C-alpha cells in the first residue's frame, strides 16, 4: 500500500463543521502539522473534501 503525507496549510477557522471534523479525523491539529496515511479510498476522499486547506505528497 502506498503512503501519502498530508500537511495542513490553512486554518480551519471560519470553515464549515464538516471540514473541521475531516481535518480532525485526518489527525491534523494546526498549520504546518504533517501526518502520514495509507492511500486508501477513504483517506483520499477525506483529502478531496479539504484539498483547499492541505497539501499532499506521495512517499
Image (spheres, grey):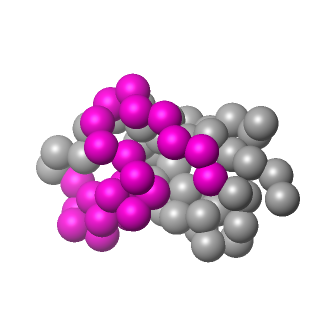
Furthest residue to the right? Answer: 1
In the image, taking residue 6 as reference, residue 41 lies left or right, namely right
Q: Is residue 18 magenta?
A: yes
In the image, taking residue 36 as reference, residue 12 lies left or right, namely left
Furthest residue to the top? Answer: 32
Looking at the image, can residue 51 be seen? yes
In the image, taking residue 12 as reference, residue 9 lies left or right, namely right
Q: Position of residue 6 (x, y in %)?
A: 55, 41
> Front-most of 7 and 52?
7
Looking at the image, can residue 19 be seen? no
Q: Position of residue 13 (x, y in %)?
A: 17, 45
Q: Position of residue 39 (x, y in %)?
A: 72, 58
The number of callouts visible is: 0
Q: Residue 32 appears in which quarter of the rendering?
A: top left
> Front-most of 23 and 38?
38
Question: Which quarter of the figure is the C terminus placed in?
Answer: top right
Residue in the picture at 40% in, 52% down: 27
Q: Which residues are magenta?
A: 15-37
Q: Is residue 29 magenta?
A: yes
Residue in the picture at 33% in, 58% down: 24
Residue in the picture at 23% in, 63% down: 16
In the image, taking residue 45 as reference, residue 8 lies left or right, namely left
Amino acid at each position: 500500500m502506498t503512503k501519502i503525507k498530508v500537511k495542513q496549510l490553512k486554518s480551519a477557522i471560519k470553515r464549515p463543521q464538516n471540514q473541521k471534523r475531516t481535518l480532525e479525523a485526518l489527525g491534523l491539529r494546526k498549520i504546518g502539522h504533517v501526518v502520514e496515511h495509507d492511500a486508501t479510498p477513504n483517506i483520499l476522499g477525506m483529502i478531496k473534501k479539504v484539498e483547499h486547506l492541505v497539501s499532499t505528497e506521495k512517499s
